[in-house]
Amino acid sequence: MKSVLIADDHPMIIMGVKSIMEKKWFMVCSVCTNGIDAYNQIIRKRPLISILDMKMPGMNAIEIIKKLQHLNLPTRYIIQTSFDDLSAFNLAKDLGVKGYLLKNFALEEFDKCIDAVAKGDKYFSVHLKKSLSDSIESSEDNLLAVLSFAERKVLTMVAAHHSNKEIAKELFVTEKTVEKHRSKIIKKLNIEPEQNALLKWVVKNMK
């Protein structure tokens, strides 16, 4: 029987997902309410599929998957999130996540996602894909078209006066990675390197 781990800090969501998976003849091998427990149980139980809430106490889904990468486990990951965040989606995709669902639309897409991931395919929320497409189209003719999604997110957060530490936490990366993004943005936008150069640029160019 195919095994699944469910991790979410909302009991009602856990109950709903568990019921759906059991009806689909999956064996629910573990239910977790925090990221640390999910991390340990994935190592111990080696489920075929792990359904992870993006934000949980202890560790978030991105942190869990990053820490498990070197173990070469057979587990396929599905992330559920309440936030339509394209930067987080791209990070998840880079980590090899097989499924990505927005909780607002999870009920209508859950079966398709599970079926696809169980077969080894990928399923990303069609609602997220629409946002991704809209974002690309809206940026094609402006100054930010040369930037990656992560770089645009950094630039937006710089404009909101967030520190490197705050940006790193939001994007699930290190402060060193944020610094690299900032350097690439300055280079791509041909900004004159000076103190607070990026902040000065966004104040002048981003409304």
Image: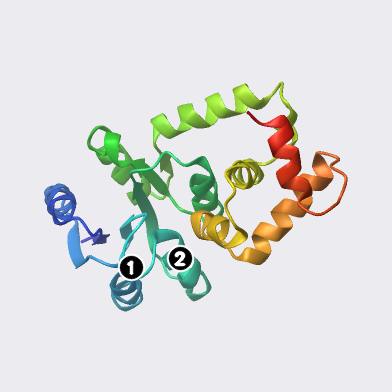
Q: Quadrant of the C terminus?
A: top right
Q: Relative to 94, is 155 on the left or the right? A: right
- The residue shown at (61%, 22%) is 137
Q: Are marks 1 and 2 in contact (CB under 8 Å)?
A: yes
In the depicted view, which residue is nearer to us: 120 or 176?
Answer: 176
Q: Secondary structure at mark 2?
A: helix
Q: Relative to 133, is 205 on the left or the right? A: right
Say which mark, if any, is on residue 142. Answer: none
- The residue shown at (57%, 61%) is 173
**195 relative to 201, above or below:** below
**207 relative to 33, above or below:** above
Residue 202 position within the rendered picture, expressed as x and y whole percent measured from the top left? 70, 38
Number of marks in the image?
2
- The residue shown at (53%, 74%) is 70
Q: CA distance from mark 1 to mark 2?
A: 9 Å
Q: Residues within 10 Å of mark 1 (few under 14, many from 20)?
A: many
In the depicted view, which residue is nearer to us: 168 or 110?
Answer: 168
Q: Which residue is mark 1?
A: 35
Looking at numbered disc 2 in the image, what kind of residue is underneath it? Glu
Q: Relative to 6, is 116 on the left or the right? A: right
**76 relative to 197, above or below:** below
Say which mark, if any, is on residue 63. Answer: 2
**53 relative to 34, above or below:** above
Residue 4 position within the rendered picture, expressed as x and y whole percent measured from the top left? 25, 60
- The residue shown at (41%, 66%) is 74
